[in-house]
Amino acid sequence: MKNKILNLKQQLDAVILAHNYQSADILDIADYVGDSFYLSQIAKSLQNKTIVFAGVYFMAESAKILSPEKDILLPVIDAGCPLADMVDVPTLLEYKQKYPDYTFVCYINTNAEIKALCDVTVTSSNAEKVVSKLNSDKIVFLPDKNLGDYIKNKFPEKDFVIWNGFCPTHERIRANSILTLKEKINDLVILAHPECNKEVRDIADFLGSTKEIIEYASNTNFKNYLIATEDGVIHTLKNNNPDKNFFVPGLPAICMNMKKTTLDDIYYSLLHKKHLISVDADITNKARRSLERMLELAR
Ligand code: CIZ
């Protein structure tokens, strides 16, 4: 299947992008691996017309918004994001009425019509920088309450209204499982994603996005790391750092949506050009403004 994919990819002059949370066999055949924003930027910079995005819906949609002229394919159309689905347009419009003088900051894990209604998008790696540059002390942050709380604590002078959403995969990671492992393993360095709950964030040695967690483990010289984020990053961490040990607390934190995509899906996505992502032109223009504002502020 890997050879079939590589041949077809060459024939079609296509590129495969895979999110850090994909399964190992997908990560191994991808041309580029990274977080959703890095991959959207890569999609924009490539000359190739056809891009297969192995990830979840909002990611392929963000790539399409930044590169409307390209064919962005999502191999499994119902690979969604429960966190992104925790915001709906009518409730967001109610919030906008209730908080008319607030700046609406949305996490990249949102659907296009939500980004279109927000002032700026952020990722977990640039949220702090973007918020620090906003000319506003009143912020509505959505949809992730954990990332929102983490950012809020960095800006005690600002007034935050935080949406009540969460990532079910990160929410399942428990501080007591981490502490149990810490008792057994000497010098365990805890690296956690800010989508984790407060108890986990409070005991972490380092908090960062997938990209920052991967960089931190590669650029430091400890032996034992505990990884509190989706399990997909472990493959890259082990490949990049064969002499280091990576542990997970309790059962691995697996996002079922991220793991829906298989090699067969990638092959049939290329063969039948499916599923072609399309975003309404008006939504594209408004959502692109929110994404481009992030780029400008995160520079
Ligand atoms: O930005 C992303 O792709 C997400 C959802 C998480 C991360 O930290 O990479």
Image (cartoon, rainbow, N blue to C red):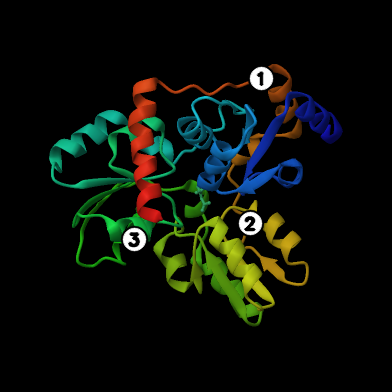
Identify which amino acid the numbered label 3 is placed on: Ile
The label nearer to you, 1 versus 2, is 1
Q: Position of residue 160 (x, y in %)?
A: 23, 55
Q: CA distance from mark 2 to mark 3?
A: 28 Å
Q: Which residue is mark 1?
A: 273
Q: Is residue 279 left or right of residue 282?
A: right
Q: Position of residue 39 (x, y in %)?
A: 57, 43
- Label 1 sits on a secondary structure element that is loop
The label nearer to you, 2 versus 3, is 3
Local packing at callout 2 (Cα closer than 10 Å; few below 14, some 14-19, many 20+) is few
Sequence-earlier tag: 1 or 2: 2
Q: Say the numbered circle drawn on residue 251.
A: 2
Q: CA distance from mark 1 to mark 2?
A: 36 Å
Q: Which residue is mark 3?
A: 151
The label nearer to you, 3 versus 1, is 1
Local packing at callout 3 (Cα closer than 10 Å; few below 14, some 14-19, many 20+) is many
